[in-house]
Image (cartoon, rainbow, N blue to C red):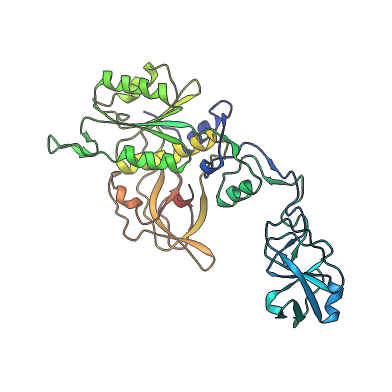
């Protein structure tokens, strides 16, 4: 069996036709982490009127030369007070209040002395001090949040300030997850023999899928029987945009997945990639739906999910599918184990203005060691052409905390 290069497989992934973006309107309270599908444009300036930035006294700047002023009344935030400032008088004004007519400056409470209805100015302020001018935050017509932005806490706050009860966002793709293998035990299931192992793949992948911004449909485990796997895949395709399976893609007698996928009417785009871990993977397409059949070992399925499922999900969301990669320096030598593109669990740190890589407490062994991904691990990339690497050499690393 011939394998294509990692680079070629990624190019094929980028060329997949996922169809038009689908949108929906949702309540702002549910919009955190969703991708905006409209430009948010200010329909008026903020603030709309000159506004107090502190608690203090609103006055005419020229009247500070008088030294003492009469307090005409209070101007609480949110009030519809019609009091106006004229020569020799001021109005006690609170943070967020619209400045009284006639006032151009606010002197903080801490900078005056108060005696009944009179203030004495202790520390003068400059003209316009502590007054938020019209449009300080934004002007009418400003594009405040561009379409394609993933909504975070700041965007939610700005949208609330614009009274956006509902926003238009990209629909989340639905991803069905299934683990194949007669030896697999689901959570809470009792072992029937010593050869059975606990399922981790479907839960690891579900977490990655949710992190990427998709809806996860957990379909559990399927035994190594052709009819059961075929029915499971048909159900998954009926309910999801992307189906991710683990197991059954290698060359064993009970690896049925690789044969079932074409029989479902799906076009196989990628079958086998020259990477470690996870060379036996399949990417297939049926209409605008996709199947990612990943290896069964826990580390392999996790890495290949990151390399192939995460970029595809991002494209469904209208985002760039590029993985977050940084350049780093090796703190210690690295022994390359194969002539393939390798993705090695490592520790990534930032010191003295640059990223550094080491492999402390990372075990060398099979593609089943999922614990290598613990403790904020990253993935170091080495290409087919790379050999052993010396300390101090520069490498590229996928930052998993930024997926």
Could you tell me which quadrant the N terminus lies in? top left
Q: Is residue 6 above or below residue 331?
A: above
The answer, for residue 340, to whether it is visible in the render is no
Using residue 203 as the reference point, say whether residue 242 is left or right of it: right
Q: Is residue 234 left or right of residue 50?
A: left
Question: Residue 142: x and y, percent?
Answer: 74, 47
Above or below residue 389? Residue 175 is above
- The quadrant in which residue 257 appears is top left
Would residue 162 be seen by someone viewing this image from the given angle?
A: yes
194 vs 249, nearest the viewer: 194
Which residue corresponds to the image point at 53% horizontal and 28% vertical from the top-left?
Answer: 16
Q: Residue at x 43, y 26 (%)?
A: 240
**Quadrant in which residue 191 is drawn:** top left
x, y percent for residue 127 = 82, 71
Where residue 19 sits: x, y (%)? 56, 25
Residue at image point 30% right, 44% down: 367
Number of callouts: 0
Q: In the image, residue 379 lies at what x, y percent?
A: 42, 50
Q: Residue furthest front?
A: 116
């Amino acid at each position: 069996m011939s394998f294509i290069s990692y680079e070629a497989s990624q190019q094929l992934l980028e060329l997949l036709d996922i169809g038009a973006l689908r949108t929906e309107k949702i309540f702002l309270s549910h919009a955190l982490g969703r991708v905006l599908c409209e430009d948010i444009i200010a329909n008026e300036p903020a603030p709309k009127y000159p506004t107090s930035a502190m608690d203090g006294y609103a006055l005419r700047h020229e009247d500070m030369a008088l030294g003492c002023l009469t307090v005409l009344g209070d101007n609480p935030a949110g009030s519809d007070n019609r009091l106006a400032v004229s020569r020799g008088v001021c109005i006690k004004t609170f943070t967020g209040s619209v400045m009284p007519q006639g006032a151009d400056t606010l002197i903080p409470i801490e900078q005056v002395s108060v005696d009944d209805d009179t203030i004495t100015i202790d520390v003068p302020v400059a003209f316009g001090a502590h007054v938020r001018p019209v449009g300080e935050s934004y002007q009418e017509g400003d594009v405040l949040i561009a379409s394609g932005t993933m909504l975070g806490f700041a965007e939610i706050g700005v949208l609330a300030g614009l009274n956006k009860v509902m926003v238009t966002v990209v629909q989340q793709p639905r991803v069905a997850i299934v683990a194949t293998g007669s030896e697999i035990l689901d959570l809470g299931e009792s072992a029937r023999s010593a050869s059975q192992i606990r399922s981790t793949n479907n839960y690891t992948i579900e977490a990655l899928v949710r992190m990427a911004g998709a809806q996860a449909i957990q379909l559990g485990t399927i035994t190594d029987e052709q009819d059961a796997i075929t029915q499971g895949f048909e159900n998954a395709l009926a309910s999801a945009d992307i189906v991710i399976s683990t197991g059954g893609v290698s060359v064993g007698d009970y690896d049925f997945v690789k044969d079932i996928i074409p029989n479902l009417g799906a076009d196989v785009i990628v079958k086998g990639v020259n990477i470690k871990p996870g060379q036996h993977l399949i990417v297939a397409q049926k209409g605008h739906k996709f199947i990612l059949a990943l290896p069964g070992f826990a580390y392999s399925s996790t890495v290949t999910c990151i390399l192939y499922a995460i970029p595809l999900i991002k494209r469904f969301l209208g985002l760039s599918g590029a993985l977050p990669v940084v350049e780093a320096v090796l703190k210690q030598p690295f022994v390359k184990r194969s002539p393939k593109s390798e993705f090695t669990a490592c520790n990534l740190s930032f010191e003295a203005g640059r990223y550094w890589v080491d492999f402390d407490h990372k075990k060398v062994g099979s593609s089943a060691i999922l614990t290598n991904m613990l403790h904020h691990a990253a993935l170091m990339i080495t290409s087919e052409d790379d050999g052993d690497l010396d300390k101090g050499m520069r490498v590229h690393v996928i930052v998993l905390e930024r997926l």
